[in-house]
Image: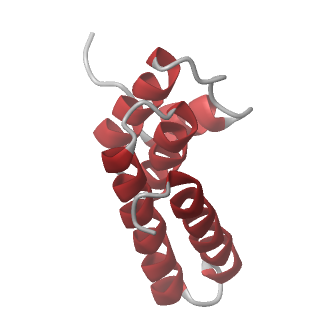
Amino acid sequence: DPSNTRLLKEEATTYLAEYHDLKKNDPDGATKALDGATTTLQRAVDVDPEDAPTAYKLAVCHLYRNECAEARRDLVRSLELGGPGAEPGFQEELDRRCPRKGP
């Protein structure tokens, strides 16, 4: 069911697990799995833009893809929607991979 956000999130979680399993030995397969997770989570956000956990998972995907602006945007959206915040280490990893520019 393409409008069932719970199922979409579960599908995306499976893609993310596959990404982690493949990233060392099969980078191309890992990229495809990450693309699947990102696309699936975006569909879930399109169905329910008020779901904070989905916005956070999408932020994680964007970070793994080095899409810094999108990762920050979705993390902020997750927090604005009342999400519990980033998992330990996420903000540090985001700041390390995506240093803020400016003064």
Number of marks drawn: 0
Residue 94 location (% of width, % of height): 51, 37
Q: In the displayed structure, does residue 77 sit left or right of residue 18?
A: left
Q: Residue at x 60, y 77 (%)?
A: 23
For the residue pair 31 and 96, the one nearer the viewer reads as: 31
Q: Name the foreground residue: 73 vs 81.
A: 81
Outermost residue, top side: 103
Query: Which residue: 42% across, 64% down?
Result: 40
Residue 40 position (above or below residue 100):
below
93, 2: nearer the viewer: 2
* Above or below, comparing residue 93 to residue 95 in the picture: below
In which quadrant of the rendered view does residue 88 lie? top right
Q: Say left or right for 41 vs 96.
A: left
- Viewport quadrant of the C terminus: top left
Residue drawn at (42%, 52%), measured in percent from left and top? 44
Image coordinates of residue 57 in percent, x first then y, are 54, 47
| For residue 72, above or below residue 32 | above
Residue 24 quadrant: bottom right
Q: Residue 29: percent from the left, percent from the top?
A: 51, 88
Q: Indicate the position of residue 92 as horizontal and vertical percent values.
A: 61, 31
Residue at screen point 46% across, 39% down = 55
